[in-house]
Image (cartoon, helix red, strand yellow):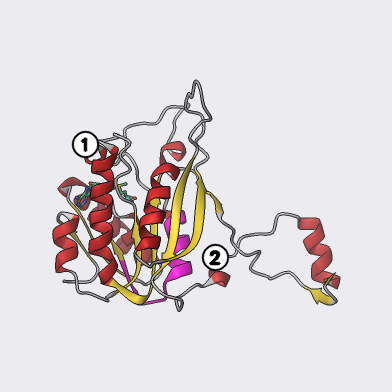
Amino acid sequence: MEKNKIYCMDCFEFLERLENNSVDLAVIDPPYNLKKAEWDTFESHQDFLNFTYKWIDALIPKLKNTASLYIFNTPYNSAYILNYLVNKKMKFRNWIVWDKRDGLAYSKNRYVNSQETILFFTKGDTYTFNRDDIRIPYESIERIEHARKKGILKNGKRWFPNAKGKLCGEIWHFSSERHKNKINGKTPKMPHVTPKPLDMIERIIKASSNKDDLVLDCFMGIGTTALACKKHSRNYIGCDNNSDFVSIANNRLSIFEEMI
Ligand SMILES: C[S@@+](CC[C@H](N)C(=O)[O-])C[C@H]1O[C@@H](n2cnc3c(N)ncnc32)[C@H](O)[C@@H]1O
């Protein structure tokens, strides 16, 4: 199969064709069974789990032994997915909480769902993690200014802040696309109901892959993973079974190419 191409194909057919042990990083944003669209609607939770376990089984052999895997979902579904992956001998690394900054939806008798989960697994114990490429600015500016000049004494050693910022934690704050696009509090119709923020996918790509690596996304939507790969000189490969989304993804990629 060709690299740097988004196939308009069902994920199972696509994964069957993809070469085993070829992928360095998989960024997977699958259906959640939240009934946001036809593709996100399953008859029962068990049907949804059967579908999810089936694509996980098809995906694992495609990963190199040094590969990383990120899977988005609701916290509830992620608990099942985590358990399944552990049973498949994948190595758990982080349960990342994505704070969507979009918590204004009405919720009558429980807390508002304002987060999604991103599970971070690796296939083995040797894998890429570019922690310095995803550092984030320090918050306590005054203390850091002081530390820059004189250092802070910690366990008998003088600690100086890193010029690139602090290490990235497991709680990620990125406004959802829905939230970013609101006009007077209302979201206009978007080309896709659940696109992921580009800057969030870029963080994953930068942390868990290197230049020229192959990144897989078998639920590509409107191509956010492909765009992040292009921006950071990674190769991508993926599919979506909706031809409209694949066209929009290819358009986004062309616009980016024209800009550089
Ligand atoms: C959550 S969305 C991905 C959105 C994407 N991350 C983005 O930023 O645009 C899931 C996508 O999976 C696709 N999809 C659902 N079932 C599929 C299947 N069996 N094979 C391939 N794609 C599928 C849908 O068309 C949808 O675009």
**Residue wearing tag 1:** 38
The local crowd at label 1, few if under 14, some if 14 to 19, many if 20 or more residues have their Cα within 10 Å, is few
Q: Quadrant of residue 138?
A: bottom right
Task: Name the one closer to the observer, 81 or 211.
Answer: 81
Magenta-colored stretch includes residue 206: yes
Left or right of 20 on screen, residue 203: right
Q: Residue at x 27, y 51 (%)?
A: 52
Task: Name the one closer to the observer, 32 or 133.
Answer: 32
Q: Where in the figure is residue 124, as x and y percent of width and height?
A: 41, 75
- How far apart marks 1 and 2 lie (CA) works out to 35 Å
Q: Quadrant of residue 148?
A: bottom right
The local crowd at label 2, few if under 14, some if 14 to 19, many if 20 or more residues have their Cα within 10 Å, is many
The amino acid on which the numbered mark 2 sits, given as a three-letter code, is: Ile
Residues drawn in magenta: 199-215
The amino acid on which the numbered mark 1 sits, given as a three-letter code, is: Glu
Which residue extends farthest top? 108
Task: Name the one closer to the observer, 63 or 200.
Answer: 63
Q: Is residue 219 visible?
A: no
**Residue wearing tag 2:** 134
